[in-house]
Amino acid sequence: MYPGSLFYGLKLHIIMISLQDCQTTLVSLSLFSFSGEKRNDYFIFSSQSSPALSSLISQKQHEGVGSTTTKSLRALALFGAGVSGLLSFATISSCDEAEHGLDVPNYPWPHQGILSSYDHASIRRGHQVYQQVCASCHSMSLISYRDLVGVAYTEEETKAMAAEIEVVDGPNDEGEMFTRPGKLSDRFPQPYANEQAARFANGGAYPPDLSLITKIREGLHYNPYFPGGAIAMPKMLNDGAVEYEDGTPATEAQMGKDVVSFLSWAAEPEMEERKLMGFKWIFVLSLALFQAGYYRRLRWSVLKSRKLVLDVVN
């Protein structure tokens, strides 16, 4: 520290932040004061696009600073801090999108409410999309044909659907395996015999089971909503890919909505029963709470309303 007049200097901090392949240069400018007859001015220009920071530092020695110079330095510091901060946050946001994917639009699904139920017509159409588009690669090993009864199909329709497949069963009395028509207790058929066959047919990628796919995600085709922007499965849904039984136009968006409704039901087939049971319990407990409150008032009203008289004379 030097005795003398009070000067303001310009202080610049350079911080390099590396987010995988993206580099962000944070430049913070701040005014600081010190006592002395001389000071140094630093002007740094940073580059965000090049891997290495390219900076040009020019140093100038001079004596005495007037009020005009002080105000200019303050304005320069505030302006530089604001601009560099905006650029830095923009770069960080861009890198985050590349790594974690874009934010998925929030669709108002009809089954997300506390007392809401599934769209069963959409579940039926979604099952049709799964059968005609997804079932050739993806399995649903946790779902049986009987789970569809009363949800998307009648019992007769489900039995006819299950009878269309052949299931390897056995052994029989002779100790040999045999094939039989499917029945309601059978699971959905597997598209491949084992994981190795599935990887061989899909170029090394293993199509995940879709029974719980709405609860977890696994994952090289471009998909901006998937982390990393790449996924092994190509786009499969196109307008008119299936023909709905109820005559609904099979647009890409409609098929996507229906198959997600079907997969959501497959992940939580007991959701409607659970919500109904919860509502019943809440109703019963509410009645019990009302009765308990009424009994408390009835029991304690006499004791709370009585008056005590003290005879101080006797």
Image (tube, rainbow, N blue to C red):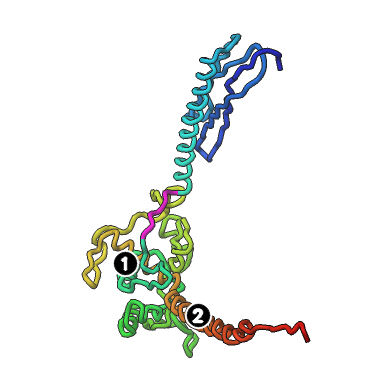
Question: Residue placed at 33% from the left, 61% from the top?
Answer: 256
Q: Work out which residue is located at the far left of the displayed protein and give it.
A: 247
- Is residue 106 highlighted in magenta? yes
Give the left or right position of residue 84, taking residue 125 as reference: right
Q: Name above or below for residue 213 compared with residue 77.
A: below
| Above or below 290: residue 46 | above
Task: Tell me the quarter of the image containing the N terminus.
Answer: top right
Q: Which residue is mark 2?
A: 286
Where, by quadrant of the figure, is residue 59 drawn?
top right
**Who's the residue at 25% across and 59% down the image?**
239
Q: Which badge, 2 or 1, comes first in the chain's sequence?
A: 1
The picture places residue 128, in percent across and down from the top left corner, at: 31, 70
At a point 50% along the width and 83% down the height, the residue shown is 287
Which is closer to the viewer, label 2 or label 1?
Answer: 2
The magenta segment is 101-107
Magenta region, main secondary structure: loop
Furthest-bottom residue in this view: 173
Q: Amino acid at mark 1?
A: Val
Quadrant of the drawing holding the C terminus: bottom right
- The residue at 48%/89% (across/down) is 174
Q: Which mark is residue 210?
A: none
- Identify the residue position indicated by label 1 in the image: 129
- Alpha-carbon span between mark 2 and mark 1: 43 Å
Residue 26 left/right relative to 300: left
Q: Is residue 50 visible?
A: yes
Please state which of residues 100 and 71 is positioned toward the viewer in this rendering. Answer: 71
Q: Residues within 10 Å of mark 1 (few under 14, many from 20)?
A: many
Q: Position of residue 32 (x, y in %)?
A: 61, 24
User: Of residues 7 and 118, which is closer to you in this image?
Assistant: 7
- Residue type at tag 2: Ser
